[in-house]
Amino acid sequence: MEVTEIAVDVSPTPGRSSRPELRWDPGGATGFAEGTLRVGPAGSLEVHSELVDLGSGIRISMTIRNPGGPGTSPVALDRLRLRLDAAPTRVMEHGWQSWSPVGPRRLRETHPRRLVAPAWVRSTYHAEGRLAGHAVCGDQFMLMTSASGGSVAGFLDGRRNLSTVLATPAGVVAIALLDGVVLGPGEERALDPMWIATGDPGKLYSELVDHWGSQSGARTAAPSPLGWCSWYHYFMKIRPDDVRRDLGYAHGHGFDLVQIDDGYAADVGDWFDPRPAFAPSQMEDLAAEITAKGIRAGIWTAPFLAGAHSRLARAHPEWLVADDHRRPVTAIWNPVTWRGTSHALDTTNPAVLDHLRETFSRLVGEGWTYHKIDFCYAAAMPGIRHASGKVTRAEALRSGLEAVREGAGDDAFILGCGCPLAQAVGVVDAMRVSADTAPKWSPGVMQVPGYPEPSPAARNAMVGTLLRAPMHRRLWVNDPDCLMLRNARTRLGADRRAAAKAVIAGTGGFTVVSDDLSLYGPEEWDQLSELREALGQTDHPLDIADPFAEVLEVSSPSSHLAARWAGSAPAPQAEDGSILVSGGDPARGPWARLSLRQPSSRA
Ligand code: 9PG
C-alpha cells in the first residue's frame, strides 16, 4: 500500500474545524513523496515527510510548516489528509473510545441512522462525530481486507492529534484532525506518526499495536485485579451496607479490589458531596474499611464532566467547553440517572487542571487507590476552549488525563472508561475496551431514540473485548467489563454466562465481578478460582488469527479462545489441551470455548 496524494485543509475559523468533506477534493492536493511538499490553498503550507521502514511496513512522520515570508499570515489547520491506494472489500470499523462500535463492515455499511443522532451521541462513536453515518471510520487505525490480501493504516501515537481512516467505495483516506490550531509564519507542528503495511490482517494488527505501544510509552505491567464492582447489580441504588456485605465475601475469597461505581455522589462532578445514603462520611469510612482488609479501595468518577445543575458547574461556568453561541456543550444527556445534561470541563484551562490534581490527590488521601475514570471523551469533544487555536482536542484530553495521574500519583491504578484510546496510552494502567455489559444478552429490539447504539448488553461487551484483544499488555491491561456469575436477578442463562466467562478468561483475565455475592454458591466460587488459575496462561499479549472471521480465535502462547457472537459458522476443532470453559451452543448462535495448552506444549 502507498500514499498517493496529500492535502492539508485550512479552517476559516481559528480554533475550529470546518465540516469534513467526504469527497477527495483535488484542490490543494499534490502527489506524495518523501521530503518537502507544498500543500494547502495556493501552496501556502509545507509538509515535510520522512519515510522509514518499520517491521513489515513503513512509518511516515510528518511536520506541517507555515513557511512565512512576505505577505504571509497565520493559518488555522483543519486536517491533513492522505489518500491511500488501498481497495478493500471489507474493513474494520473502529471508534475512538471504549464504548464506540467496533466490527467488520462492508464499505456501504455506514449505519445511516447515526446521521440523525444528537451531536453528543455521534461524539461517542467517532473522533470526527460528523462522519458518523456517512462513512465507515477506523479511528486511530483501520484494518482492511480484500480477495488479494490485507492491509492496515494507522497512527502510532495519539498525543498530538486525533485521527481517523475512512473507507468509502471511492477510496481510503487517512486523516489527522487538527481542530483549527493556528500556525503563525515560520511556525511548524509535528503530527503523530503513521504506519502503513500490507499482509495478513491478524498479524498486522498485533504488529501495529506493538509499534504503537512502544512509540507511546505504554504502561503494561500492572497486575490484573480480582475485584468486585457495584454497578451491574446495584446500579444507582447502591447503599453503603451493600458494599459492606459484599466486602465481607470479597475478603473471604481473596479479592484484591472492591470498587464503588456511580451512585454515591449527589451530582455529576460533585464527588465529595454524598447522596443522602452516603452522608455524611460513609465514603471515607468505606475506603478505610476496605483498605483495612488489605483490599484496594476503588472509586468511579467522571473527571471531565460537570452536571448542568452541579455545584461545580454553578461555581465555575467558565470551566466548561462551549459551543459557537457560548453555551456549554452537552457531553451526555441522561434523564434517568443524572437529571439530564452534563457538560464537559475545559482541560486547557489551568484552573481546571489544578482542580483535577486536587480532586485526585484528595481521593487518594481518603484511601481510594483504584480509579475508574469514566466519560473521558468529554475532554476531547469539539467546542471552544481556553486554548482553542493553540491545542488540538487530543492535546486537551491528554492534559486532563495527565493532571489526573499527577493528582493520583504513580502508584494509583487508573482504569480509563468511555475514554479515547490513543491519548490515554502511557497514563492509564487499564482500559475498558468495550461497550457496557448488562445482565442480559442483547440490547433488545427497541432502541431509545437519541441514546447510543452500543447500549448495555453482554453481547456488545463481548464484541469489543474480542476485537480489541491485541491491545492487552501492549497498550495497557484490557478491561473486558464486569463478569456476572449470579444465577438470580439476571436474564443471562448458564450458557451465556459461561460464554462471557470464557471470553473474559481468554482475553487476558481482568476479572471484576459485579454481583451481590450473597447469591453465590459453591459453583460460582469454583468458577472464579478456575478463572484465576487460567491467568498465568492467558494474561499475555494476544493475537487474533483473522479479525474478519465469524469465529474469532484469540491466542496467547499457552491459550486458545474461539468465540462467535452471532451467526453459525462452524466451530474450529478444539486444540489439544485442557478445555477450561465452554459456553453457548457451538451448532448455532453465540458461543465461546477457552482451551489451555498443556504446560509441555507451551511456547
Ligand atoms: C455508570 C456507568 C458504569 C459503566 C460505564 C458507564 O451513553 N450513555 O448514556 C452511557 C451511560 C452510561 C455508561 C455508558 C454510556 O456506562 O461504562 O461501567 O460505570 O457509566 O454511570
Image (spheres, helix red, strand yellow):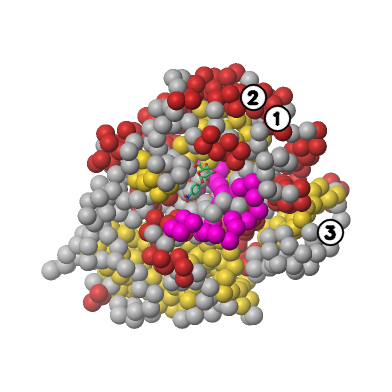
Near-viewer residue (536 or 366): 366
Mark 3 CB within 8 Å of ligand 1 = no
Decide if residue 582 is on the left or right side of residue 209.
right
> In whole angstroms, how far apart are the C-alphas of marks 2 and 3?
41 Å
Sequence-first tag of 3 and 1: 1
> In whole angstroms, how far apart are the C-alphas of marks 2 and 1?
8 Å
What residue do we see at 34% from left, 60% from top?
178
As helix, strand or loop, the secondary structure at mark 2 comes to helix
Disc 1 marks a residue whose amino acid type is Ser
Disc 2 marks a residue whose amino acid type is Arg
**Residue neighbourhood size for the residue with mark 2, other residues' Cα within 10 Å, grouped as few (<14), some (14–19), many (≥20):** few
| Mark 1 lies on residue | 518
> Residue 183 in magenta?
no
Decide if residue 548 is on the left or right side of residue 376.
right
Question: Residue 34 got which mark?
Answer: none
| Mark 3 lies on residue | 574
| Mark 2 lies on residue | 245
Q: Which residues are magenta?
A: 425-454
Residue 262, percent across and down?
Answer: 50, 37
